[in-house]
Image (spheres, rainbow, N blue to C red):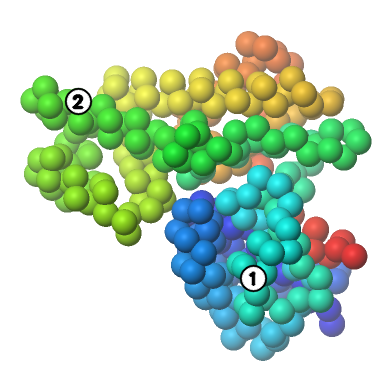
Amino acid sequence: MKYYLGIDGGGTKTTAAVSDETGKIILKESGETINFYSVGMEAARNNLADVIEKLKNTLGICRFDGAFIGCSALDSDADEETINALCGGIINADRIGMSSDVYVALKASSSNCIAICGTGSMAVAEKDDGTIIAKGGWGHIVGDEGSAYSIAIRAFRECCLMCDKNERTALLESAEKFFGVDNLRKAIDLIYSPDKTKDYFAAFAKDVSSLADAGCGISKSIIIEEAKAYARTVISLLKETDNCHTLMLYGGVFQHNVLFRNEFITEIRKIYPLLQAEILDIPPEEGALSIARSLK
């Protein structure tokens, strides 16, 4: 029997799936992120090794006929040096490839255009000639508008202003609870601690969403502005895309934040009123498996 490996390496977690040559899923395992820009190459390799070890222990195999990795640190195909830096000595496969996690999500969808909004954000489309176009994905330092990280950081900035003005709000109290302090200034060491990665801060976006649902005006405003900002990025992609009738949406922000999703779609339809938007219901790791089985 032939075995194929497909991996979706998002900004927060990594999911790996193994299939046979018919595409039947045999096993899935998950672990921490392999985004080497976020956690560093050593930690990314360790996280990847942990997931692969789980697969090996259950399946009793150590070699794959083909493997493909989608990694959130990338926005295009990886060269051999990058593949070896992350996977060397960890994944044993006859053929191996690696590209953006957004690319494998696109391959898992039935559309030629996908927008991903999770810990980070990015959008890609495949033109009729097979050319891949990418927008966004600049990373959490200069981009990733609409992402959980961007929502959280915008909220933390608002909380800092509230703290300076001695304003007690539900958002500020939620931030203090998030950091485990009774005054936000006591969280400064935590905020700048080198072991606090972007997925740690991104988790606060869930609190912002809950507060918005409960009627917090500031939280609602943050989410709406982030949705509009990300919509501008996706509109720039749609302007260069051939015949996109359905925009697939993927990622925790789209899946769990109804206000964000609705505002985003509203902005898109101001320019593209007939465009359909659907949540991707096929896991991206299955897209990676499809690519792995086709590698030559």
Q: Which type of secondary structure does the marked residue at label 2 adopt?
A: helix
Q: Amino acid at mark 2?
A: Leu
- Quadrant (top left, top right, bottom left, bottom right) of the N terminus: bottom right
Q: Which type of secondary structure does the marked residue at label 1 adopt?
A: helix
- Crowd around label 1: few <14 · some 14–19 · many ≥20 (10 Å): some
Check disc 1 and report the residue beneath it.
87
Percent coordinates x, y for residue 265 in the rendering: 59, 22
- Crowd around label 2: few <14 · some 14–19 · many ≥20 (10 Å): few
Residue at x-position 63% and y-position 11%:
270
Q: Amino acid at mark 1?
A: Cys
Q: CA distance from mark 2 to mark 1?
A: 44 Å
Compare residues 265 and 234 and report the one nearer the observer. 234
Of labels 2 and 1, earlier in sequence is 1
Question: In the displayed structure, would residue 245 be above or below residue 23?
Answer: above
**Can residue 13 be seen?**
no
**Which corner quadrant of the image does residue 183 belong to?**
top left
Percent coordinates x, y for residue 282 in the rendering: 69, 50
Compare residues 196 and 227 and report the one nearer the observer. 196
Q: Is residue 22 left or right of residue 222?
A: right
Residue at x-position 37% and y-position 24%:
222
Check disc 2 and report the residue beneath it.
161
Q: Is residue 82 left or right of residue 156?
A: right
